[in-house]
Image (cartoon, helix red, strand yellow):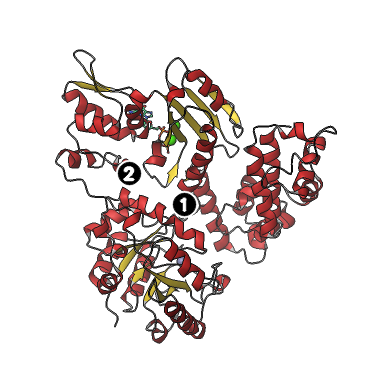
């Protein structure tokens, strides 16, 4: 049994434990072990025999005594007792069902017990036949929502979220870098352009080990990386493979002299490249993945860096996020590209949760973590009571929470400002979930929709308009409600909403959670056109999630935004002055 198979079985066990509603800590230990195993260069099967050193497995970080015993069982028998026990109850395909909207572990387990339905095709059949509505809390509405969810899921499968892709890129890069003579590894393609999802991963590698004549040894190194599931192709300077989750990875090893041309070519997008090549031809040049050449005599004009290539085509440097052939070439030609926002421009974060509702950490911990990340102000915006599953705050608890937030603000002694706020739920008719008198005590009221995504477009639009008409609302939170690869945006007339938000001075949020990433880049460009105030927030539910501001910034850059377009780049006093005035 090879390492990838061991990793897959451990991961599958984690999924089965999830359906079994096991302790999250236990689930994580199996996931972590799977990741540790697939990164090992030694085949674990060789460490488990009767002659093997019993300590060898324990030396691997992430593998304790229990896990070592599991691995020995897997190698010896092809399975292990816990897995057998879980498989007697569930099917591994049930894991996929967890990715559908409304399908938590309990629902998945119930559908399995009641109807013996354990995979997507069977679930779709059962839903269409009306079998689900015989089960508790799964009426017709649930069935319709689920069928839509299955459709969305099928449409999106095969793509990966940018944060997943980024994590895999980092892990693979670390392994490639172990080979001597590698200087630089750059993710290209859609990941470098910062798209919300990627189809496959394109990694470009350069260094002395990638030069012609010696590159084959580095190719062999890449082709034998431990986490490769299936090797798809091994060429002179290219290796393609898939990972255990089916993500395809294309690695190209390139000489230093043409690295810039390759980076430009493989970053794309295809449409940007087509337009750029046409521009080259008009100038008597030809652009390829190897170089920008003069047509008449094949003399190299530029190749080593992207900057040289753009300059030789009389263009300002175009940031990867803008390379979608949506006006960037024209702007680069007449020196009107925007000075794009960067992470360092951000000074505040106005949307985050604590353990008062569904967050993990305390107000103080969130404040310290934000301070450590260089922020100078944050708002604590826990959920309101309508979101019962998050332990949302009613009016009394919300007011008590304001007091505690003010205490922490005082404790922080001006090192960072901690503002009392709320993420108040927008109810089905557009009313807000808390009393105006409660909202009046908050510095930051973020209003968001979390339910009834099925309303017709006119109703949802009117619902949001009514909500932002409430004078206490200062920010409209994640305005489309989508969950990437999981749930489409609800139907809403964004043009009307943005126009009204601009009139009222309500800021619209870009939510930096990679699962949400709304408003998307097109909506953000529209928001700017309408003169909307824009904020970018992490919606962090734990301290480390404050780090995902990065993903939000990438989307803002894709929308051509500068620091001046985004409110929470301002120093605290100016920021507060720019918000919608309190009634
Ligand atoms: P993805 O993987 O679907 O998220 O999107 P990309 O943009 O990463 O596309 P991919 O992986 O097929 O190719 C990476 C880049 O390589 C692409 O953005 C531009 C360049 N490229 C690939 N094939 C072609 C082609 O046939 N023509 C041109 N001009 N460029 C190409
Ligand atoms: Ca790609
Ligand atoms: Ca590719
Ligand atoms: Zn939130």
Report if residue 158 is visible in the image.
no
- Label 2 CB sits under 8 Å from any ligand 1 atom: no
Instruction: Name the residue at 45% across, 27% down.
Output: 252
Give the CA distance from mark 2 to mark 1: 19 Å
The residue lying toward the viewer, choosing from 378 and 494, is: 378
Local packing at callout 2 (Cα closer than 10 Å; few below 14, some 14-19, many 20+) is many
The residue lying toward the viewer, choosing from 235 and 278, is: 235
Tally the marks: 2
Looking at the image, residue 212 lies above or below residue 413: above
Extreme residue in the left direction:
334
Quarter the N terminus occupies: top right
Report if residue 496 is visible in the image.
yes
Looking at the image, residue 361 lies above or below residue 34: below
Q: Residue 57: percent from the left, percent from the top?
A: 74, 40
Q: Residue 219: percent from the left, percent from the top?
A: 51, 23
- Label 1 CB sits under 8 Å from any ligand 1 atom: no
Is residue 152 rendered to the left or right of residue 312?
A: right
In this figure, which residue is indicated by the disc labeled 1? 484
Looking at the image, residue 366 lies above or below residue 152: below
Q: Which mark is residue 321?
A: 2
Instruction: Name the residue at 54% across, 29% down.
Output: 241
The residue lying toward the viewer, choosing from 79 and 228, is: 228
- Quarter of the view holding residue 101: bottom right
Quarter the C terminus occupies: bottom left
- Dots 2, 1 in contact, CB < 8 A: no
Looking at marks 2 and 1 on the same chain, the residue that comes earlier in the sequence is marked by 2
């Amino acid at each position: 049994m090879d390492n990838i198979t061991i990793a897959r079985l451990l991961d599958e066990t984690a999924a089965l434990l999830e359906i079994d509603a096991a302790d999250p800590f236990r689930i994580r230990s199996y996931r972590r072990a799977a990741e540790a195993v697939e990164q090992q260069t030694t085949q674990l099967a060789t460490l488990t025999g009767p002659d093997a050193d019993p300590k060898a497995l324990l030396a691997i970080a992430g593998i304790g005594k229990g896990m070592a015993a599991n691995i020995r069982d897997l190698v010896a028998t092809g399975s292990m007792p816990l897995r057998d026990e879980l498989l007697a109850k569930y099917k591994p395909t049930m894991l996929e069902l967890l990715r559908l909207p409304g399908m938590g572990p309990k629902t998945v387990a119930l559908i399995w017990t009641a109807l013996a339905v354990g995979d997507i095709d069977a679930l779709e059949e059962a839903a269409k036949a009306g079998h689900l509505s015989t089960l508790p809390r799964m009426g017709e509405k649930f069935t319709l929502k689920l069928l839509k969810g299955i459709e969305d899921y099928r449409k999106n499968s095969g793509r990966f979220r940018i944060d997943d892709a980024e994590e895999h890129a980092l892990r693979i890069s670390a392994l490639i870098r172990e080979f001597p003579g590698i200087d630089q590894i750059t993710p290209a393609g859609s990941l470098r352009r910062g798209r919300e999802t990627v189809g496959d991963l394109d990694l470009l590698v350069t260094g002395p080990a990638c030069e012609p004549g010696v590159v084959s040894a580095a190719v062999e190194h890449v082709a034998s990386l431990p986490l490769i599931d299936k090797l798809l192709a091994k060429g002179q300077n290219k290796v393609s493979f898939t990972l255990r989750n089916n993500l395809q990875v294309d690695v190209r090893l390139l000489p230093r002299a043409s690295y810039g041309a390759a980076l430009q070519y493989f970053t794309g997008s295809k449409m940007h490249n087509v337009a750029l090549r046409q521009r080259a031809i008009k100038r008597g040049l030809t652009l390829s993945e190897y170089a920008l050449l003069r047509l008449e005599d094949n003399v190299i004009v530029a190749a080593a860096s992207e900057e040289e290539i753009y300059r030789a085509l009389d263009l300002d440097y175009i940031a990867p996020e803008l390379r979608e052939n949506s006006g960037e070439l024209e702007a680069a030609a007449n020196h009107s590209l925007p000075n794009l926002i960067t992470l360092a421009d951000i000074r505040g974060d106005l949307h985050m949760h604590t353990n008062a509702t569904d967050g993990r950490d305390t107000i103080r911990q969130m404040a310290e973590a934000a301070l450590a990340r260089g922020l100078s102000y944050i708002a604590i915006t826990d959920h309101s009571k309508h979101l019962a599953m998050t332990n949302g705050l009613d009016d009394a608890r919300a007011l008590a929470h304001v007091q505690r937030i003010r205490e922490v603000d005082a404790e922080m002694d001006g090192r960072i400002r901690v503002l009392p706020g709320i993420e108040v739920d927008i109810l089905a008719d557009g009313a807000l979930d808390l009393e105006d008198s409660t909202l009046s005590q908050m510095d930051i009221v973020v209003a968001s929709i979390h339910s009834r995504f099925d309303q017709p477009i006119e109703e949802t639009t009117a619902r949001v308009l009514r909500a932002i008409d409430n004078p206490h609302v200062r920010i409209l939170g994640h305005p489309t409600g989508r969950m990437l690869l999981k749930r489409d945006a609800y139907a809403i007339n964004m043009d009307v909403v943005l126009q009204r938000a601009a009139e009222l001075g309500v800021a619209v949020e870009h939510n930096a959670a990679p699962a949400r990433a709304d408003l998307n880049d097109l909506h953000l460009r529209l928001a700017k056109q309408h003169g909307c105030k824009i904020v970018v927030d992490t919606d962090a539910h734990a301290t480390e999630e404050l780090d995902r501001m990065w993903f939000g910034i990438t989307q803002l850059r894709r929308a051509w935004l500068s620091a001046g377009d985004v409110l929470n780049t301002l120093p605290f006093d100016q920021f507060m002055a720019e918000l919608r005035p309190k009634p």
